[in-house]
Amino acid sequence: MGSADPGEAPERPDPALVERLSRVSAATACAKLHAQGIRRTFVEGPRPIEAGQKVAGPALTLQFMPQREDIASGLGQEYVERHTALWAALEAVRPGDVLVVQAYGSAFTGCFGDMLVRYFKQKGGAGIVVDGRIRDAPRVRRLGVPIWCTGFTPHYASQSELFPWAYHVPVACGGVLALPGDLVVADDDGAVIVPRRRAESVVQAAAEHEQWERFSRSRIEEGGALSDYYPLTPETRAEYERWKENAR
C-alpha cells in the first residue's frame, strides 16, 4: 500500500500575509507572477463546484499514484484507505489549509466524499483543489466547503485506477508544481499556485494593480477612452497619481 508517512510539514505562513492575499484575485495573482517570470501557475482543469467561491491559504499537498496490483488493486480498499495518506492528510489539516491534490484528472477516482469533506470542514480546512473528481455531490455542496475539481463520480478514492500515496510532498496539480507551504488563491476564474517566496511581492504588486484598475474603471465608466486608461499612458498615469494623492 501507499505510505501514510508524510514528507516534512511546511512552516506556517504569517496569517497577516494570508489575509492580504485573500484580497487578491486569481487573475491578478497569475498576472503578477507571470510578470516575475513564473509562467505555470494556473491549475488547469478544476472548476469551482459553486459560483462565488473564494479561498486563499497555505497548500497541504496530497499525492495519488497509479495502482499496481501487487500493492493496491482497488478490491475492498474503501476500508484499507483509512491506513493511507488520504486519512493521514486529513488528520494533518490545520485551520486555513487548502488541500491541493494530484489525481491526474482521473474521471474514475472520487478523491473525497461527504464524510471526508465533512471532517475537513470540522478541522478548519479552508478549501480543496483537486485535478480529479469527488463524489456525494448533493451532500458535499450542502457543506459549503469551497472546492475546485473536474467533476463528480460515484467511485470512492481507490476503486478504480489511483491510490492515495503520500502527503506533505511536491505534487503536480493540473500541470502546476505545488510544494508544501506554497500558497493558493482560487475563485471563479480557477486556482493559482503562489510560490511561498513570491507571495509578499505578489501581494504588494497586486495592491497597486487593483488600485489603478479602480481608477481606470471609473474613468472608462465616465466615458474615457480604453486606449487611454487600460493600460495607463504616461499622461493618464500622472492623472492617476494625482487621483491617488487626493484619495489619501
Image (cartoon, helix red, strand yellow):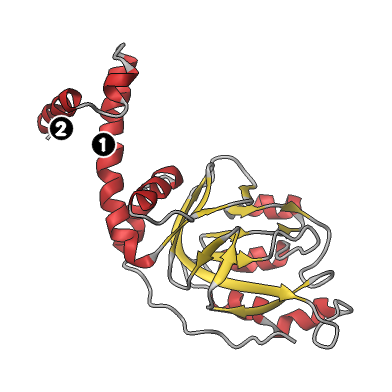
In this rendering, the answer to whether 6 lies above or below 59 is below
Tag 1 residue: 211
Image quadrant where residue 28 sits: top left
At 47% from the left edge and 68% from the top edge, which residue is drawn?
A: 95
Residue type, mark 2 in image: Lys
At 32% from the left edge and 24% from the top edge, which residue is drawn?
A: 217
Q: Is residue 211 left or right of residue 68?
A: left
Instruction: Report if residue 98 is visible in the image.
Output: no
The answer to which of 246 and 68 lies nearer the viewer is 68
Disc 2 and disc 1 in contact, CB within 8 angstroms: yes
Q: Sort mark 1 into few (<14), some (14-19) or many (20+) by Cα contacts within 10 Å.
A: few
Q: Earlier in the sequence, mark 2 or mark 1?
A: 1
Instruction: Report if residue 234 is visible in the image.
Output: yes
Q: Secondary structure at mark 1?
A: helix
The answer to which of 234 and 60 lies nearer the viewer is 234
Image quadrant where residue 109 sits: bottom right
Tag 2 residue: 244
Q: Where residue 87 appears, x then y in whole percent?
A: 66, 78
